[in-house]
Image: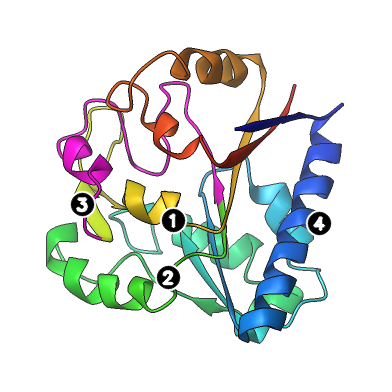
Amino acid sequence: MKFITYPNRETLIASLSDIVTAELGYAIEKNGAASLSVPGGTTPGPMFDRLNQSDLEWSKVAILLNDERWVPETSPRSNTALLRARLIQNKAAVAQLIPLYADAETPEEGLAALSVGVEAVLPLDVLVLGMGGDMHTASLFPGADLLEKSLADDAPTLLPMRAAGAGEPRITLTAPVLKAAKHIHVLIMGEEKRTALEAAMKLNEIDAPIKAVLENASVHWAV
């Protein structure tokens, strides 16, 4: 794990945005296409605002979330709606969005079709993850119903996930997909998250799921 400290959040966002842009550009140059997976929530929003102004061949970039709540885009809880509003804008408006939600009652019903779309853009070229204070990442929550299955080496691409701290049912990329990304970045801010990360290093993956991806990750932190 590479731990990078920044003097402030603005510098972190600027630096990580530039790194992600460069890594996507290299993938496009080398392979003719690139894939980017990002977290939802409010923390990466400023990075999305900066990325969507980047001079990339965005039409050759596939974008997907790390995970999604099983709610339609009309819900204020939808990370897909956030992605459309903050990242798939301006120069990035022509990027391809790979969905992690389908019009079905449960994530189990949409799983097979959604997996096909995700698998078409694997392995991920660039992966940006967040981390909760409980040491979850994507929807790999401590205590989640299918956590052990999602951490296994033979886990499927996507799994539904339910956990006490998750609210709605979720759908998530599994640990093997996350670990196979060519470039892995973890974005965290604040002393609480740094303390949680330090605690995770001393725990196993069941208790601290973020640990599953840390070995080859760059962690970007600012107060």
The picture places residue 109, in percent across and down from the top left corner, at 12, 66
Disc 4 element: helix
The picture places residue 92, in percent across and down from the top left corner, at 69, 75
Disc 3 element: strand
Depth order, front residue of 58/202: 202
Lower position in the chain sequence, tag 1 or tag 4: 4
* Residue, disc 4: 18
* Residue, disc 3: 160
Lower position in the chain sequence, tag 3 or tag 1: 3
In the image, taking residue 216 as reference, residue 152 lies left or right, namely left
Disc 1 element: loop
The three-letter amino acid code for the residue at tag 1 is: Ala
* Residue, disc 2: 122
**Closer to the camera: disc 3 or disc 2?**
2
**Closer to the camera: disc 3 or disc 4?**
4
Whether the residues at callouts 2 and 1 have beta carbons within 8 Å, the answer is yes
* Residue, disc 1: 180
Q: CA distance from mark 1 to mark 4?
A: 22 Å
Q: Which residues are magenta?
A: 128-156
Q: CA distance from mark 2 to mark 1?
A: 9 Å
Classify 10 Å Cα crowding around label 2: few (below 14), some (14-19), many (20 and above): some
Q: CA distance from mark 3 to mark 1?
A: 20 Å
Disc 2 element: loop
Lower position in the chain sequence, tag 2 or tag 4: 4
- Quadrant where the image shows the N terminus: top right
Lower position in the chain sequence, tag 3 or tag 4: 4
Depth order, front residue of 97/16: 16
Q: CA distance from mark 3 to mark 2?
A: 19 Å
